[in-house]
Amino acid sequence: MALSSSPLRFTVRRCQPQLVPPAIPTPHELKLLSDIDDQEALRFHSPAILIYGKQASMAEKDPVEMIRQALSQTLVFYYPLAGRVREGPHRKLMVDCTGEGAMFIEADADVTLAQFGDSLQPPFPCFHELLYHVPGSQQITNTPLLLVQVTRLKCGGFILAFSINHTMCDGTGVSQFINTWADMARGSTKPSIPPVWCRELLMARHPPRITCNHREYEHVPDTIEGTITSTEHDMVQRSFFFGPSQIAAIRLLVPPHLQRCTTFDIITACFWRCRTKALQIEADEEVRMMVIVNGRARFNPPLPVGYYGNAIAFPAAVTTAGKLCENPFGYAVELIKKVKGVVTEEYMHSVADLMVIKDRCMFTTIRSCIISDLTRGRFREVDFGWGEAVYGGVAQAGIGSFLGGTCQVLHKNAKGEEGIVLPIWLPAQAMNRFAKELDNMFGNQNQTTIASPTFIMASL
């Protein structure tokens, strides 16, 4: 059920962007990124948003100043994030640790938290006002690696929005960084988990050799079927909530031998199946679901605690649209469950080698989607002194410029139910079909859509 019928509009008054350097001088050096870090798929700035309500005990505190000062202190320990990425021969990326700092914007908005409605999730009204894209800030090289805007609200709450260069860290790394940042705001003087660089652990071998099957990087010729036609260029962004009743309804469709599958597995399988039906892809066409897997624990020994670089792989489950949609739901669940298990230490090294051999290529985007589990990041629990965030997670659907990407984010809905929110992009007509397919899987509970759509011109 859509909760708002007219878009919320408000005015944001921004101060001039300023650089926030580390609080004390830090090493000036050149540090290579790993061959997992600098692949094409990660060359974008990933936006996130944390929304906080008024806290009586913090009435005399200015969130802008506290967060800015804490950022400066945090960058002492994460000093590469105060530098700039450079590109060398063979598209190799490295960090020039210049100590210039992160870009920071102070702002005030003439709106209260209540005006956003009872439930906050992507798409956020006027997000471009809550995180101003400073000209040039979306480039990958020679620009700040972290862009931050703190916007005070009329009610005493505030919004922290930021984007971070994804070549520097994955979701686990961002979580580690932002929790340190919040700890510093609350008075800590050093990180509880010291950051670890060690990017050499995920460099390509000499000589590089592809030893695993990487269907996520296959070259797939485009076809008319399953692509966006000229009549469907209006893309819609919408979030869907999976609460206890919705998850229970989907679990009823899972066969006994798969009952131990995770909530992530069934939501991912549900999304893949409903999306494929909604896009009306021809039955004999191949479709793929790439699952972002954290590879830290797949190493022996595991990667060092505190490693904040990209330690992820995107293994792909591949089948035909016909098999995915016509088989029982357990077929999709089993594919997702199985593909997560293919990531090993050897698989990670094979990906790094593939990047060197294949010029740091992009993953397959034709008839593909990709999903990340951000529930373990627990971004909503990040506490700068104002307690738990009302919302904490991704700011929008998509993975960089690829609109077929989504994330599972912990969320509490207007009823106070704990669950998972899934923000997605689809063509307008396909989005309506997706919502109907999801309703069918939920048993027509009429509780699927929880956000008004945002329309943009784009291609999937």
Image (cartoon, rainbow, N blue to C red):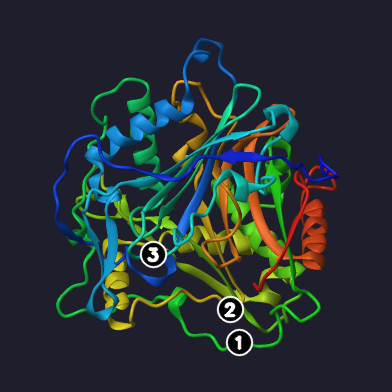
Q: Quadrant of residue 185?
A: top left
Q: Is residue 211 visible?
A: no
* Label 1–label 2 contact, CB within 8 A: yes
Between disc 2 and disc 3, the foreground one is 3
Q: Earlier in the sequence, mark 1 or mark 3?
A: 3
Residue linked to disc 1: 222
Task: Tell whether 145 sits left or right of 407.
Answer: left
Q: Residue 85 location, x and y as percent? A: 29, 62
Identify which residue, 86 or 435, lies in the foreground: 86
Q: Earlier in the sequence, mark 1 or mark 2?
A: 1
Distance (Cα) linking label 1 and label 2: 6 Å
Q: Residues within 10 Å of mark 3 (few under 14, many from 20)?
A: many
Q: Quadrant of residue 427?
A: bottom right
Residue linked to disc 3: 140
Between disc 1 and disc 3, the foreground one is 3
Identify which residue, 94 or 412, lies in the foreground: 94
Q: Amino acid at mark 3?
A: Ile
Which quadrant is home to the N terminus? top right
Which quadrant is home to the C terminus? bottom right
Q: Amino acid at mark 1?
A: Asp
* Label 1–label 3 contact, CB within 8 A: no
Residue visible at 81% across and 63% down in the picture: 433
Q: Residue 138 location, x and y as percent? A: 46, 61
Residue linked to disc 2: 366
Considering every residue shown, the one lying at the far front of the view is 16
Q: Residues within 10 Å of mark 1 (few under 14, many from 20)?
A: few
Distance (Cα) linking label 1 and label 3: 28 Å
